[in-house]
Amino acid sequence: MFGTEHYYGIDPDANRVQFAKRLYPNYTFTVFDGKQIPMHNQTVDILLIVAVLHHISNEQIAEYLSEFQRVLKPEGKIIVIEPYLSPKKKFNNWFMTRYDDGEFIRNEDDYLQLFNNQLYDCTVLKKFRKLLLYNEIFFTAASKSNIAQNDKLFLNPSL
Protein backbone atom coordinates (compact mmCIF):
# COMPACT_ATOMS: atom_id res chain seq x y z
CA MET A 1 0.00 0.00 0.00
CA PHE A 2 1.25 3.46 -0.84
CA GLY A 3 1.82 5.92 1.98
CA THR A 4 1.07 9.62 2.01
CA GLU A 5 4.49 10.38 0.53
CA HIS A 6 3.43 8.58 -2.66
CA TYR A 7 0.16 10.45 -3.17
CA TYR A 8 0.07 13.59 -5.29
CA GLY A 9 -3.27 15.32 -5.88
CA ILE A 10 -3.84 17.92 -8.57
CA ASP A 11 -6.78 20.13 -9.43
CA PRO A 12 -7.09 23.26 -11.58
CA ASP A 13 -9.21 24.94 -8.86
CA ALA A 14 -7.03 26.60 -6.17
CA ASN A 15 -9.94 26.63 -3.70
CA ARG A 16 -10.36 22.87 -3.99
CA VAL A 17 -6.63 22.37 -3.53
CA GLN A 18 -6.68 24.48 -0.35
CA PHE A 19 -9.71 22.53 0.91
CA ALA A 20 -7.96 19.20 0.24
CA LYS A 21 -4.83 20.43 2.05
CA ARG A 22 -6.95 21.28 5.11
CA LEU A 23 -8.71 17.91 5.05
CA TYR A 24 -5.57 15.86 4.39
CA PRO A 25 -2.54 17.79 5.64
CA ASN A 26 -0.18 14.82 5.28
CA TYR A 27 -0.80 14.53 1.54
CA THR A 28 0.58 16.65 -1.29
CA PHE A 29 -1.80 18.75 -3.39
CA THR A 30 -1.05 21.36 -6.01
CA VAL A 31 -2.89 23.51 -8.52
CA PHE A 32 -2.71 22.06 -12.03
CA ASP A 33 -2.19 24.76 -14.67
CA GLY A 34 -3.84 22.55 -17.29
CA LYS A 35 -0.62 22.27 -19.27
CA GLN A 36 2.06 20.39 -17.37
CA ILE A 37 1.94 18.25 -14.26
CA PRO A 38 4.96 19.22 -12.15
CA MET A 39 6.44 15.72 -12.21
CA HIS A 40 9.25 14.04 -14.11
CA ASN A 41 8.61 11.82 -17.14
CA GLN A 42 7.51 8.24 -16.48
CA THR A 43 7.32 8.53 -12.68
CA VAL A 44 3.65 7.74 -12.01
CA ASP A 45 2.27 4.24 -11.47
CA ILE A 46 -1.44 5.07 -11.27
CA LEU A 47 -3.54 8.08 -12.17
CA LEU A 48 -6.94 8.07 -10.50
CA ILE A 49 -9.71 10.12 -12.09
CA VAL A 50 -13.01 10.16 -10.22
CA ALA A 51 -16.00 12.20 -11.42
CA VAL A 52 -13.86 14.79 -13.20
CA LEU A 53 -14.08 14.15 -16.94
CA HIS A 54 -17.77 14.97 -17.21
CA HIS A 55 -16.83 18.56 -16.32
CA ILE A 56 -14.22 18.86 -19.08
CA SER A 57 -14.53 19.30 -22.86
CA ASN A 58 -13.23 16.68 -25.29
CA GLU A 59 -10.44 19.02 -26.43
CA GLN A 60 -9.22 19.61 -22.89
CA ILE A 61 -9.34 15.90 -22.08
CA ALA A 62 -7.20 15.19 -25.16
CA GLU A 63 -4.57 17.63 -23.87
CA TYR A 64 -4.68 16.08 -20.39
CA LEU A 65 -4.33 12.56 -21.78
CA SER A 66 -1.21 13.59 -23.67
CA GLU A 67 0.29 14.94 -20.45
CA PHE A 68 -0.76 11.82 -18.55
CA GLN A 69 1.14 9.72 -21.09
CA ARG A 70 4.26 11.73 -20.34
CA VAL A 71 4.17 11.16 -16.56
CA LEU A 72 2.96 7.53 -16.56
CA LYS A 73 5.51 4.79 -16.20
CA PRO A 74 5.50 2.30 -19.12
CA GLU A 75 3.42 -0.13 -17.04
CA GLY A 76 1.30 2.69 -15.55
CA LYS A 77 -2.48 2.83 -15.73
CA ILE A 78 -5.23 5.36 -15.49
CA ILE A 79 -8.22 4.34 -13.39
CA VAL A 80 -11.44 6.17 -14.20
CA ILE A 81 -14.86 6.31 -12.53
CA GLU A 82 -17.35 8.62 -14.24
CA PRO A 83 -21.09 9.05 -14.56
CA TYR A 84 -22.23 7.93 -17.99
CA LEU A 85 -25.39 7.98 -20.09
CA SER A 86 -26.89 4.54 -20.57
CA PRO A 87 -29.38 3.73 -23.33
CA LYS A 88 -31.19 1.44 -20.87
CA LYS A 89 -31.55 4.01 -18.06
CA LYS A 90 -33.42 6.94 -19.60
CA PHE A 91 -34.72 8.32 -16.29
CA ASN A 92 -31.22 8.20 -14.78
CA ASN A 93 -29.87 9.97 -17.86
CA TRP A 94 -32.48 12.70 -17.52
CA PHE A 95 -31.73 13.11 -13.81
CA MET A 96 -27.96 13.31 -14.31
CA THR A 97 -28.13 15.80 -17.18
CA ARG A 98 -30.61 17.95 -15.28
CA TYR A 99 -29.04 18.00 -11.80
CA ASP A 100 -25.32 17.34 -12.22
CA ASP A 101 -23.02 20.35 -12.66
CA GLY A 102 -21.02 18.49 -15.32
CA GLU A 103 -21.77 19.77 -18.80
CA PHE A 104 -20.12 16.83 -20.56
CA ILE A 105 -21.67 13.62 -19.29
CA ARG A 106 -20.94 11.13 -22.06
CA ASN A 107 -22.04 7.64 -22.97
CA GLU A 108 -19.70 4.69 -22.51
CA ASP A 109 -18.46 4.66 -26.10
CA ASP A 110 -17.70 8.39 -26.04
CA TYR A 111 -15.50 8.09 -22.93
CA LEU A 112 -13.64 5.10 -24.34
CA GLN A 113 -13.23 6.77 -27.74
CA LEU A 114 -11.63 9.83 -26.12
CA PHE A 115 -8.96 7.55 -24.66
CA ASN A 116 -8.61 5.44 -27.82
CA ASN A 117 -8.08 8.60 -29.88
CA GLN A 118 -5.11 9.42 -27.65
CA LEU A 119 -3.65 5.91 -28.06
CA TYR A 120 -4.87 4.27 -24.87
CA ASP A 121 -6.23 0.75 -24.55
CA CYS A 122 -9.27 0.69 -22.27
CA THR A 123 -10.81 -2.10 -20.25
CA VAL A 124 -14.25 -1.61 -18.72
CA LEU A 125 -14.18 -3.25 -15.30
CA LYS A 126 -17.70 -2.52 -14.12
CA LYS A 127 -20.83 -0.48 -14.76
CA PHE A 128 -23.00 0.23 -11.73
CA ARG A 129 -25.54 2.57 -10.20
CA LYS A 130 -24.57 5.08 -7.52
CA LEU A 131 -27.12 6.82 -5.31
CA LEU A 132 -29.87 5.00 -7.27
CA LEU A 133 -29.93 7.61 -10.04
CA TYR A 134 -26.35 7.78 -11.31
CA ASN A 135 -24.97 5.37 -13.89
CA GLU A 136 -21.24 4.94 -13.25
CA ILE A 137 -18.58 3.41 -15.45
CA PHE A 138 -15.34 2.09 -13.98
CA PHE A 139 -12.52 1.46 -16.46
CA THR A 140 -8.76 1.41 -16.82
CA ALA A 141 -6.62 2.84 -19.59
CA ALA A 142 -3.03 2.04 -20.51
CA SER A 143 -0.98 3.89 -23.07
CA LYS A 144 -0.62 1.90 -26.30
CA SER A 145 2.81 3.40 -26.86
CA ASN A 146 3.88 2.26 -23.39
CA ILE A 147 2.40 -1.19 -24.04
CA ALA A 148 4.28 -1.40 -27.35
CA GLN A 149 7.49 -0.31 -25.63
CA ASN A 150 7.02 -2.99 -22.94
CA ASP A 151 6.41 -5.62 -25.63
CA LYS A 152 9.56 -4.55 -27.46
CA LEU A 153 11.60 -4.75 -24.26
CA PHE A 154 10.15 -8.16 -23.49
CA LEU A 155 10.85 -9.49 -26.97
CA ASN A 156 14.33 -8.03 -27.13
CA PRO A 157 15.80 -7.56 -23.62
CA SER A 158 18.96 -5.98 -25.10
CA LEU A 159 16.99 -2.81 -26.05
Image (tube, rainbow, N blue to C red):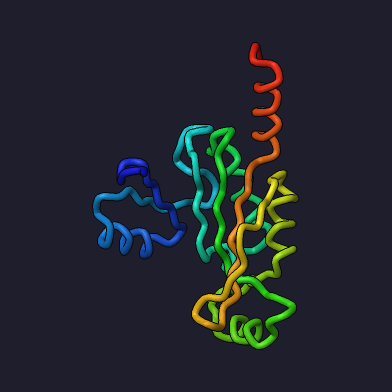
Residue located 64% across and 71% down the image: 84
Residue located 74% across and 63% down the image: 109
- The image shows residue 9, relative to residue 129, as above or below, that is above
Residue at the top extreme of this rendering: 158
Disc count in the image? Answer: 0
Residue 140 position in % (x across, y down): 60, 52
Q: Nearer the viewer, residue 132 or 103?
A: 132
Q: Quadrant of the C terminus?
A: top right
Side of 110 relative to 1 (left or right): right
Residue 2 position in % (x across, y down): 36, 43
Residue located 65% across and 86% down the image: 94
Snapshot quadrant of residue 70:
top right
Snapshot quadrant of residue 72:
top right
- The image shows residue 20, relative to residue 26, as above or below, that is below
Q: Quadrant of the N terminus?
A: top left
Residue located 71% across and 31% down the image: 148
- The image shows residue 122, relative to residue 22, as above or below, that is above
Snapshot quadrant of residue 25:
bottom left
Residue 103 position in % (x across, y down): 61, 74
Residue 43 position in % (x across, y down): 48, 34
Side of 7 relative to 114 (left or right): left
